[in-house]
């Protein structure tokens, strides 16, 4: 609970999801200031008087979170799961409590990962592009577009081994769906640990044995470029990679090289090092890559009606709980 019973709540990015109707218990009162979008240049001015901040992905640096810039700020409610855009050390130093919406987007993210797998294994985009170029008519068959990295027909779910790197709520949901489809599932231990722990296998074994790898882990200094040249060199030629976690966990240059040289059979990416992403910011999105078995989506794995409902319920719960001195889903 803050030092005051009257709060100034500032919401910086309501274009992602509308702010719910906020009702605080007596004796708390508040003013709510909402911004559809906030340019980085205007962050400091907009949060200068805030005691409570509602944010999503806008970067909040140590300087932005300093006492000089936002002297009254006491609580940040993140309308998202990831908090990697916030300097959590700066928040901890000042005693600013940060809560997120952990678990809000589990189902759509898991379903997005599975749909990406099917799109890659069946090479749906390449097949569509081949037909659009009149290839079926001219060649009589486009089966060659569907063959995998070993020049064989696609394998089916019962022959897949899915490796999951990051076994939080989303990873567990992906595993449940994969097992229901008949896949064998391997859960990776942390990269530095090569021993089996609680049924998990070493990161290196997951890289070598999986026919599809799904990344569902947070971005941190330890996970940056977790998948790069060394990992792609060890993956199977008919293996697929799906990243629905955060940009930077996969080395984009190394991934493009692996796809171009057919070290792996395909990849689907929902997140990028620099977002919004386009041909000028990511080598993966350049026009010359249209012949690759690659699916790109604009950070939409989380996007679902149920996610909006969950976000709104959790944001309201976060703020009320913090006011009452019993914060929930605390990150720091």
Image (cartoon, rainbow, N blue to C red):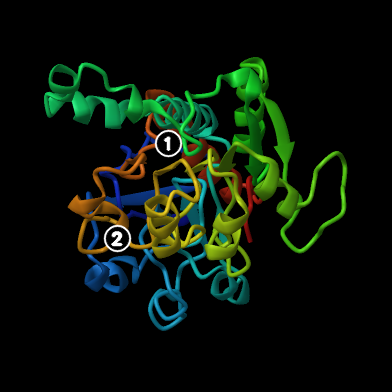
Name the quadrant of the N terminus: bottom right
Q: Nearer the viewer, residue 295 or 247?
A: 295
Q: Is residue 113 above or below residue 29?
A: above
Q: Residues within 10 Å of mark 2 (few under 14, many from 20)?
A: some
> At numbered mark 2, what does the secondary structure look like: helix, strand or loop?
loop
Residue 45 sits in quarter: bottom left
Q: Is residue 283 left or right of residue 229?
A: left
Residue that mark 1 sits on: 302
Q: Nearer the viewer, residue 47 or 163?
A: 163
Residue 49 sits in quarter: bottom left
Q: Earlier in the sequence, mark 1 or mark 2?
A: 2
Mark 1 and mark 2 in contact? Answer it, CB < 8 Å. Answer: no
Q: Is residue 294 left or right of residue 226?
A: left
Q: Is residue 164 left or right of residue 30?
A: right
The image position of residue 328, as x and y in percent, is: 64, 45
Q: Residues within 10 Å of mark 1 (few under 14, many from 20)?
A: many
The image position of residue 128, as x and y in percent, is: 23, 25
| Residue in the image at 63% along x and 52% along y | 330
Q: Tell me, yes or no, if residue 1 can be seen here.
A: no
Residue that mark 2 sits on: 282
Name the quadrant of the C terminus: bottom right
> At numbered mark 1, what does the secondary structure look like: helix, strand or loop?
loop
| Residue in the image at 52% along x and 27% along y | 107
The image position of residue 305, as x and y in percent, is: 37, 24
Residue at mark 1 to residue at mark 2: CA–CA distance? 21 Å
Q: Nearer the viewer, residue 141 or 202?
A: 141
Q: Is residue 254 above or below residue 301?
A: below
Residue 72 sits in quarter: bottom left
Q: Tell me, yes or no, if residue 285 can be seen here.
A: yes
């Amino acid at each position: 609970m803050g030092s005051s019973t009257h709060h100034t709540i500032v919401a910086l990015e309501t274009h992602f999801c509308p702010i719910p109707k906020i009702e605080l218990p007596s004796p708390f009162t508040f003013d709510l200031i909402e911004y559809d979008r906030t340019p980085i240049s205007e962050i400091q001015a907009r949060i200068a008087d805030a005691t409570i901040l509602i944010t999503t992905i806008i970067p909040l640096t140590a300087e932005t979170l300093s006492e000089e810039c936002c002297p009254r700020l006491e609580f940040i409610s993140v309308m998202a799961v990831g908090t990697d855009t916030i300097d959590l050390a700066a928040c901890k130093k000042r005693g600013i409590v940060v809560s997120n919406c952990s678990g809000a987007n589990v189902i759509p993210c898991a379903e997005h990962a599975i749909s990406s797998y099917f799109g890659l294994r069946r090479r749906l985009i390449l097949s569509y592009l081949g037909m659009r170029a009149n290839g079926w008519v001219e060649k009589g068959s486009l089966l060659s577009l569907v063959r995998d990295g070993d020049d064989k027909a696609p394998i089916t779910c019962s022959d897949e081994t899915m490796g999951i790197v990051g076994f939080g709520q989303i990873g567990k949901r992906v595993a449940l769906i994969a097992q229901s489809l008949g896949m064998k599932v391997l859960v990776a231990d942390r990269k530095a640990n090569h021993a089996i722990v609680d049924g998990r296998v070493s990161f290196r074994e997951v890289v070598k044995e999986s026919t599809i790898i799904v990344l569902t882990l947070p971005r941190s200094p330890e996970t940056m470029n977790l998948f790069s040249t060394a990992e792609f060199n060890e993956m199977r030629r008919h293996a697929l990679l799906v990243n629905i976690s955060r940009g930077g966990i996969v080395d984009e240059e190394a991934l493009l090289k692996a796809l171009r040289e057919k070290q792996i059979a395909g990849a689907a990416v929902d997140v990028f090092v620099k977002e919004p992403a386009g041909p000028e910011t990511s080598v993966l999105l350049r026009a010359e890559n249209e012949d690759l078995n690659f699916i790109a989506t604009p950070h939409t794995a989380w996007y679902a009606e149920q996610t909006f409902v969950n976000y709104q319920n959790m944001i309201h719960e976060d703020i009320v709980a913090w006011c009452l001195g019993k914060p929930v889903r605390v990150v720091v």
